Amino acid sequence: MGENNIKMIPMPETLLLQLFQNSPYLWLTFVGLLSLFIGSFLNVVIHRLPAAMMQEWKHECNLLLGQNTQDNTPPLGLLSSISWPASHCPKCQALLKKWHNIPLVSYLLLKGRCAFCAVSISPRYPIVELLTAVLSMAVAWFLGPSWEGIWGVVLVYFLVPMSFIDLDHKLLPDQLTLPLLWTGLIINSFDIFVSLESALWGAVIGYLSLWLVYWGFRLITGKHGMGYGDFKLLAALGAWLGWEAIPMVVLMSAIAGLIVFFGLRMRRTETDPEMPFGPLLALGGLAFLLDGDGILEVVNSLVFIQ
């Protein structure tokens, strides 16, 4: 066959993106407001996705064991479980009005309590909304109004719910890690962050590096040091940021983990402190996304200092 001269089609510049480029503060305002509402939806994902997965697992186990119980009722699909039922108070089951779902504002107006039964609302909800907005605006600021900025914000929308689910359940759902991995490969086929070759090897190296650490630790200690979800998350970050990012993401995650570990040890609890690795990987990935070149320069200066 002859030489392949096919070139990738560049991502088109849209009118909206051009408007944001002409007005950076409008770009930040748009990302911030949008991210508050996305954060409100992410609260639903964080709360309902693990419960829906557990219900599905119980149903499958009962079918395998041949047990006839009420749990044998086929569960709703995961998407249906997230979208239904409508938002309601977990205590009194009253359906929330539209203005009750305004991010941050409704929590402040209601003074952190249900409008119907006055039960306290967890501060987790406004925290997730605010964190999503702050991280998204940071990415939007550093990457600017560009396709890199848009997809960087999308990455935040994946990492926030995965981090909180991992904190709550020590679980990184395939329903989030695998779409994140494939999305990274697809967007980098257009050279958004790195080349497709770098993204592909980033996914491979990301998965295998933690897989080898896991089995080495298990062979030496006989214990499980981490879960397979961590492998998939690092593979996904490699698909987004390229294989060059993997060492720095792992290094920054390990440093953050040590800081958290010793912080928890200072509390002098009776049991050994446990910290899931997923949020630390997410933190390392976002740090590299914001200023990967700067991080590499700092590391190189420390390594080759004379």
Image (tube, helix red, strand yellow):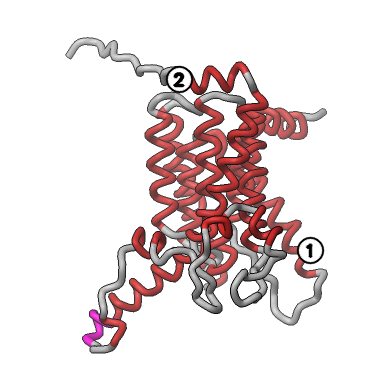
- Can residue 209 be seen at all in this image of the molecule? yes
Nearer to me, 115 or 36: 115
Q: Label 1, on which residue?
A: 263
Q: Quadrant of the N terminus?
A: top left
Please determine whether, in this image, residue 146 is positioned above or below residue 261: above
In the rendered image, residue 123, in percent from the top left (x then y), is placed at 68, 64
* Alpha carbons under labels 1 and 2: distance apart: 47 Å
Q: Which residues are magenta?
A: 62-66
- Mark sitting on residue 164: none
What secondary structure is the stretch in magenta mostly built from? helix
Q: Are marks 1 and 2 in contact (CB under 8 Å)?
A: no
**What residue is drawn where x is 53% and y is 48%?**
38
Q: Quadrant of residue 58?
A: bottom left
Quick one: which residue is furthest to the left in this view? 1
Nearer to me, 217 or 27: 27
Considering the numbered disc 1 on the image, is that residue within a helix, a strand or a loop? Answer: helix
Going by the numbered disc 2, the residue's amino acid type is Thr
Q: Label 2, on which residue?
A: 14
**What residue is drawn where x is 53% and y is 74%?**
90
**What residue is drawn where x is 64% and y is 33%?**
29
Considering the numbered disc 2 on the image, is that residue within a helix, a strand or a loop? Answer: loop
In the rendered image, residue 107, in percent from the top left (x then y), is placed at 66, 60
- Can residue 248 be seen at all in this image of the molecule? no
Going by the numbered disc 1, the residue's amino acid type is Gly
Nearer to me, 84 or 263: 84
Nearer to me, 159 or 249: 159
Apparent side of residue 97 relative to residue 29 in the rendered image (left or right):
left
Apparent side of residue 67 relative to residue 92 in the rendered image (left or right):
left
Q: Quadrant of the C terminus?
A: top right
